[in-house]
Amino acid sequence: MAIEQKTPTTRPNLTVDLAGMRLRNPVMPASGTFGYGEEYAPFLDLEDIGAIVTKGLSLKPKAGNPTPRIAETISGMLNAIGLQNVGIEAFQKHKIPFLRTVNTPVIANFFGNTLEEYGAVAEQLEEIPEIAAAELNISCPNVKQGGIVFGTDPQAASEVVRLVRSKLTKPLIVKLTPNVTDITVVAKAVEDAGADAICCINTLTGMSIDIHTRKPRLANKTGGLSGPAIRPVAVRMVHQVVQAVSVPVIGVGGIVCAMDALEFLIAGATAVQVGTANFVDPSAMLTVIRGIEEFCVNEGLDDINQLIGSLRV
Amino acid sequence: MAIEQKTPTTRPNLTVDLAGMRLRNPVMPASGTFGYGEEYAPFLDLEDIGAIVTKGLSLKPKAGNPTPRIAETISGMLNAIGLQNVGIEAFQKHKIPFLRTVNTPVIANFFGNTLEEYGAVAEQLEEIPEIAAAELNISCPNVKQGGIVFGTDPQAASEVVRLVRSKLTKPLIVKLTPNVTDITVVAKAVEDAGADAICCINTLTGMSIDIHTRKPRLANKTGGLSGPAIRPVAVRMVHQVVQAVSVPVIGVGGIVCAMDALEFLIAGATAVQVGTANFVDPSAMLTVIRGIEEFCVNEGLDDINQLIGSLRV
Amino acid sequence: MKNYRTKIISNQEVSPGYYRMRILAPGFGAKARAGQFVMFRVQRSLPPLLRRPFGIFKVGFMEPDCDDMPPKEYVEILYKVVGRGTTIMEALHEGDGVELLGPLGNGFDVTDTDGEMILVGGGIGLVPLYMLASELVEHSSVRLLMGGRTRDDILAVTEFERLGVETYVSTDDGSLGEEGLVTKVLERKLQKYPNAKVFACGPMPMLRAVREKCLDYNAPLQVSLEEFMACGVGACLGCVVKGAGHTEETPSYLCTCTAGPVFKADYLDWEKLGQTEETECGGCS
Amino acid sequence: MKNYRTKIISNQEVSPGYYRMRILAPGFGAKARAGQFVMFRVQRSLPPLLRRPFGIFKVGFMEPDCDDMPPKEYVEILYKVVGRGTTIMEALHEGDGVELLGPLGNGFDVTDTDGEMILVGGGIGLVPLYMLASELVEHSSVRLLMGGRTRDDILAVTEFERLGVETYVSTDDGSLGEEGLVTKVLERKLQKYPNAKVFACGPMPMLRAVREKCLDYNAPLQVSLEEFMACGVGACLGCVVKGAGHTEETPSYLCTCTAGPVFKADYLDWEKLGQTEETECGGCS
Ligand SMILES: Cc1cc2nc3c(=O)[nH]c(=O)nc-3n(C[C@H](O)[C@H](O)[C@H](O)COP(=O)(O)OP(=O)(O)OC[C@H]3O[C@@H](n4cnc5c(N)ncnc54)[C@H](O)[C@@H]3O)c2cc1C
Ligand SMILES: Cc1cc2nc3c(=O)[nH]c(=O)nc-3n(C[C@H](O)[C@H](O)[C@H](O)COP(=O)(O)OP(=O)(O)OC[C@H]3O[C@@H](n4cnc5c(N)ncnc54)[C@H](O)[C@@H]3O)c2cc1C
Ligand SMILES: Cc1cc2nc3c(=O)[nH]c(=O)nc-3n(C[C@H](O)[C@H](O)[C@H](O)COP(=O)(O)O)c2cc1C
Ligand SMILES: Cc1cc2nc3c(=O)[nH]c(=O)nc-3n(C[C@H](O)[C@H](O)[C@H](O)COP(=O)(O)O)c2cc1C
Ligand code: FES
Ligand code: FES
């Protein structure tokens, strides 16, 4: 009896508060690597993870890029999906009914190619009750501004966040691109513009060439580098952003196992996202969650929050 | 007889012209990974490689950072050596005598923490006849400008290149940092300021945390990420820079074997540098050179220059 | 579908550069349908990072190791060594631990059993046709037209014959069977059997030629396609092909991993299938 | 020194978590000196990326495989399984191909053979002491003080005895030999032999304690250090320690791989040895 009672009390608390949401644990998928949730339902219980993050949504359906869209690199992969998605309307009609049945907060990742598009999607997300929070991807080229990426310009980033904020009362997470000189400048800009949390990083722009055909491996020439290869860059940026802002930060980039996730948490991330690793192992997130729990037990911590930001410098 | 004669004539030409230098082949070490040349002399014939590139030199000897200075990451490594070097004077006195005996062009990598320091080193390099060319590393913090890195600001980059150019008649290679939003802007700035060639990339800033001690793995907290992990980023940037400028480009970042080097050459690099791979295999450069030659033979090319920039897009 | 963490039963070279690997997979066969595939994890440590897709060649049961054990259910793949992952695979041995996600994807539609069944396989494209043949021979007369560059690329033909399939071999260099392209044989068969249904898997130029012939003779065609895959379950959107009627304005992209790998030929946009096109966007995701 | 592309002769667990690996290395022994090390390439493919440094435990010759063959010259390392690289190493077998760079670094100075020789080894720090002992026993009387946490960390002691070395074992938990720290034994020996010379290798706290005792008794000390290494040949400057007299203004950094791994204790700055300090610069290279 005594032993039986002990087990539950020694299980560490893994719940974290993120921008007004309470998550059962700090582990969620990275947008674009988990479809709309349903795709991975056969492989893991969606009620075991902290949140579900959808593929990036846009106002209208988006066709994406020609193939090849993916290429493997050393300890990483390049992708140039081109943000293919069903569009916000079809999402609500065809994907929400399934998500409604899952007792896990749904975070809708979204984007636009113009300021207006961003605003319009935000308005619609506000109206979908099943969506707990929105994750704003600002790694997209601003077609009106000659294709400069919103997220590489603090001014443009601030503007889009301000607009979206004005349409959205739900928690707003802003996801930053790492392809910038100083990520803290953009982080501060989006915090000032009203972000409730910051997610970093998106993919590093990369390229790979097939030396036999002498063509780029991706039809789009360049693509986004993800996977373990980029983890040191992601950890560095998360650490920098945590120092620079006071809103919570979600760490993402190259997480495969619990040790990787712990680096981000110790650096100060309130939650983490697992991306490419889902492709390698559909139950990767469960392994990460179990490993974090085990680590807390071994370190004698009864609450994950004692770990977050515990970096000794 | 006929066969004997055939062999030499079918050996492809590997010599390339780089900023006024003629190199026997396009493969050289990346600065900081090959000491001052002598360290690797027991392992490979220094007259087999295209050039020797020294560890970064400064006006005065530099102590560098505390240890740990290196940490392994997935398919890469982080370093925060802190640019330890013997200083230009000791270099001339103790390292040049050996280099004089080697019939391979010596490229001196150098840096400063102020504009004046950069200028002063350039003046001294100009006076050392054994030095064929100078490689200007602008990835250093400008101590006078509050530590902003010269190479992340096109203005500052231009200024330092202009100054160095005014002191140096030897070929001037400028080495760029990848930690910028748009590397083509910096590339154009340094070309305009008088660079004869551009070398990219230096290391990506990264960080790794020991989850057990909860400390950064490097005493310096952050360090430079190098090795195969960064290759897709390097290839992308080399491709971008080749499009943006008309001076030759040296490609560096994650090259381990000939296939890797060929990606850069096809993307338009006139030469390549091998860095971290020297640590893994001291004869890595020879393997790369042999592999490039073999590739040319297999592709029926009699001149490496037919390959350079042959990307099909 | 599920992720099997399991072991290799055997891994043998059957022709130069081609291997057959049997993997222990209890419960797999009942779910697997002809034309489906698995995502194989080459090794637990990196690299290579991503899983590799392989068609299901066979499913079945082997004698148990001893009397009181259940028979060992297996899935068998047949693969060609082409790159990094398959080079690691060829060195694997009986008893080595592997991971296998499957069965995945959309298989052949075998509901309509009328008429002659003609299977066209090019090299390693033969793989999904074996299970298909096993199902089809129950109701129909089945012919396999098997093509390859040389005799080394002609695989497992006797096994098809043992099923009762009539087989026709052609090689580019004439080193086995008829010299020339498999479509030459196909044309003769289509002339002979006006009611034939065609099922094809192989390199894109072959599929394209098969498609032309089937259009000429008005024969329904199903093809199995290959695309680069990261996830295999419809999550990454890396493996799409264009559906019939695809335009820039009304795009129709189909996932090879979920809508395929087997498609009815008419559902596809053959215009640019298997060709690389270029665009230029930021390409972040 | 050179890069040996060679094969493993044997790789055996000698105590829980400790392995001895013999590697074929013709011509190695003639160049190797006590205290030197090798850079071992764990595998040809990644990861791990970097080589791992290991002390040279032994060099020697084995019986040839048959009459007409030359005897097989080998180098032997003794390693503890601690992380990714060594975990891969423990699974290696006879005949597996490996690469080995060496012999590298600066070994023990054994020119002065006067007086008693006291070797102090902590756990795996025993490794470089075996070759040292073999050389020293020629001219001097040699004592080995071997410490470890438990009996499992006490290695190869009988081999030292076979050389004619007097050995003293102590363990933290008393599971073998004397209970307590090896420095307790050292103190007794230093009291007894005022002319002793000390050679030590082991964890930093042990080295620090040994250093204190040697200062107390005015005994010359040589220590073998460990630092993270990328190149092993003085090129990367990753492995430095501070030399005696190091200041911010007149810095003196010594490469562990070339100036060491063996240092005369007086040449080192013991203040911060083995401690992590912090600075903050761009840290690009
Ligand atoms: C649905 C499907 C079924 C397949 N069935 C079989 C089969 O039964 N037998 C068989 O031998 N092969 C099959 N393939 C092809 C097989 O997946 C590739 O040959 C294999 O992934 C190559 O791996 P590699 O690491 O050896 O090659 P790599 O070194 O990665 O690349 C070599 C070449 O293989 C191809 N390739 C690499 N990765 C993929 C990928 N993820 N998807 C598709 N092609 C890739 C590319 O053309 C590349 O140029 C199938 C592919 C798909 C999509
Ligand atoms: C000159 C020298 C001689 C050595 N001799 C021996 C020996 O004879 N036997 C032995 O068992 N060990 C020896 N070591 C230590 C040995 O190099 C490490 O235990 C080994 O590199 C760990 O590799 P890993 O991949 O298993 O561990 P990792 O997973 O890389 O790391 C585990 C721990 O090992 C240590 N380590 C990792 N890489 C290095 C490195 N490049 N240099 C130093 N320490 C590292 C770190 O403390 C790290 O926390 C020696 C080290 C040096 C510098
Ligand atoms: C195939 C793929 C598709 C992606 N799609 C999106 C997306 O739609 N929106 C977004 O914000 N990020 C997208 N990303 C980026 C990931 O969410 C994540 O930031 C990145 O992959 C780094 O994490 P990882 O290394 O764990 O994969 C995508 C990544 C991949 C690999
Ligand atoms: C240990 C180390 C030291 C370096 N020192 C310098 C340096 O002094 N000057 C410089 O311009 N680059 C320096 N670099 C950067 C390399 O020259 C090269 O740009 C980078 O490592 C990427 O190439 P790689 O992936 O082949 O290593 C250093 C890199 C390493 C790993
Ligand atoms: S492989 Fe990921 S969607 Fe098809
Ligand atoms: S390990 Fe590179 S200098 Fe010592």
Image (tube, coloured by chain):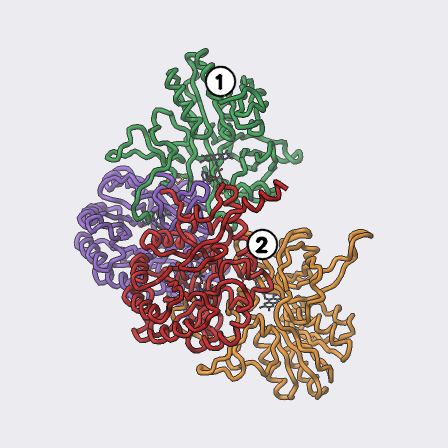
Chain colours: A red, B purple, C orange, D green
Q: Residues within 10 Å of mark 1 (few under 14, many from 20)?
A: some
Q: Which residue is mark 1?
A: D185
Quarter assignment of residue B186: bottom left
Q: Pick out the residue farthest to the right.
A: C67
Mark 1 → mark 2, Cα distance in angstroms = 49 Å
Q: Is residue C143 above or below residue B37?
A: below
Amino acid identity at mark 1: Val
Image depth: mark 1 or mark 2 in front: 1
**Residue C84 visible in image:** no
Q: Nearer the viewer, residue C44 or A239?
A: A239
Q: Is mark 1 within 8 Å of ligand 2?
A: no
Q: Quadrant of ligand 6?
A: top left
Q: Which residue is mark 2?
A: C43
Query: Do callouts 1 and 2 point to residues on the same chain?
Result: no
**Residue A63 visible in image:** yes
Q: Residues within 10 Å of mark 2 (few under 14, many from 20)?
A: some
Rendered-image quadrant of the N terminus of chain C: bottom right
Task: Give coordinates of residue A270: x percent, y percent.
Answer: 42, 54
Q: Is residue A161 above or below residue C49?
A: below
Please give the name of the residue rendered at 39% of the width and 38% of the height, measured from the top-left corner: D239
Q: Is residue C204 above or below residue B269?
A: below
